[in-house]
Amino acid sequence: MNLILLFDVFLIAALLLVSWRLLGASDLFQATVLFISFGLFLSLAWIRLGAPDIALAEAAVGAGLAGVLLFGTFKGLEPGADRENDSFTSEPCRLDPISPCPGKIHLLLAFTCVGSLTTLLVLAVLDLPATGDGLTPMVSQFLERSGVEHPVTAVLLNFRFYDTWLELGVLVAAVLGILCVRNRFDLRELKVLQAPDVMLRRLVMGLAPTMALVVVYLLWLGDHAPGGAFQAGVVLAAMLVLLWFSGHASITGLSRMLWLFCLIAGFAVMLLVAVVSALWPEMRPLEFPEEWSAMIILGVEVVATLSIGVALSSLAILSLGAVDDPGGS
Amino acid sequence: MQVLAGMLCLLGAFFFMAGSVGVIRFPDSLSRIHALTKADNLGLGFIVLALVITSQSVAVGLKLILIWVLALVASSSICFFLGRKLIRGG
């Protein structure tokens, strides 16, 4: 018990240290690497709190995908200035050499906002009942009526269906946003920065089937254990990005219609479920009939995995792809 | 069995430690990659072995070995790519 406590203290100390170093980092590359390691420590903390679902999502999205997006962004911010450029001589107050130093008003504003947010969060935590299981008894009471055996999947895809639905909407909005910023309409002309080589092609060719297998396995696992659409979608996205990176046919080979179809399929299917259940007699919106719920959940999860994979890999490809000719000009 | 697994874990931790010391102490990037990938793969191998002999089912053991093989493939190819980039001075 004491050893575990020691580990927890180390974990908290590491989280605080990494976040402090992250805030004080002098260049963007260092800050990105520290952010990724912060995400990994955070996923360890989720494991210690007994939430492997969140830990998986945090490691994949918070550390992996966010890291890729940040690398892509800072490559766009300082073109040519790679990490060899160690003679970074600007003042420590600014990471981005172009932007001006924040004044006293900015700092005061930031401190007020962060301070009040922290106070609210601390008050919210203090407001929680000191003992008790929260909503756990309720979830386990209705678990057998949900159509799946894992409580997290039951909450995400049955009890709180609309949360997952809106999350998929957020992903579609994110892809739309980055399309606007990069001034593009599809992914077809996007190229890798360097020509892919034989070694990488062979490696990815060997790895891709294993990754596809892991996608299906994670998707199937969501029924009774930690896993499910989001985790499977992230692995699918990683596979698609690797395929693109090594010069194989990936989502950049899809036609625009097909790509958009895959992108919005998850959101659209959930919308369809919502509309059908709203119009069905003697049923409330987003309510499934019990005998069908297992099938509905599995179907929605498969389509959602496809959409999540395509959306996340589009984000990564759009932020890493070469910017030779913006499509609109 | 438990004692053997504990010893294998300690051995794995020793190799991880050696790899980390190497990353900090070695002078240039090539030897750092060498320390990191070789020693850490061996350390991971010992820890996976410890987990396999204490795991309850064959399926779990095979999954653990699969994780080790994937980590081996990934880290050695990343080592190759980084090393080639460093030698070419890219």
Image (cartoon, coloured by chain):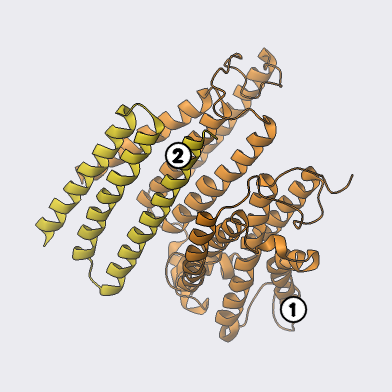
Chain colours: A orange, B yellow
Residue A276's disc is 1
Q: Is residue A55 left or right of residue A266?
A: left
Give the image location of residue A222, x and y in percent. Answer: 48, 69
Which element is circle 2 on?
A: helix
Q: Is residue A241 left or right of residue B8?
A: right
Which element is circle 1 on?
A: helix
Question: Callout 1: 10 Å neighbours few (<14), some, many (20+)?
Answer: some
Residue furthest to the front in view is B88
The answer to which of A180 and A109 lies nearer the viewer is: A180
Q: Residue drawn 50% across and 39% down?
A: B85
Amino acid type at circle 2 is Ser
Instruction: Pick whichever of labels 2 and 1 is earlier in the sequence.
Output: 2
Question: Callout 2: 10 Å neighbours few (<14), some, many (20+)?
Answer: many
How many marks overall? 2
Which of pointers 2 and 1 indicates the residue nearer the eye? 2
The answer to which of A128 and B9 lies nearer the viewer is: B9
Residue A221's disc is none
Q: Which residue is mark 2?
A: A37
On the question of residue A3 being in view, the answer is no
Q: Is residue A100 left or right of residue A237?
A: right
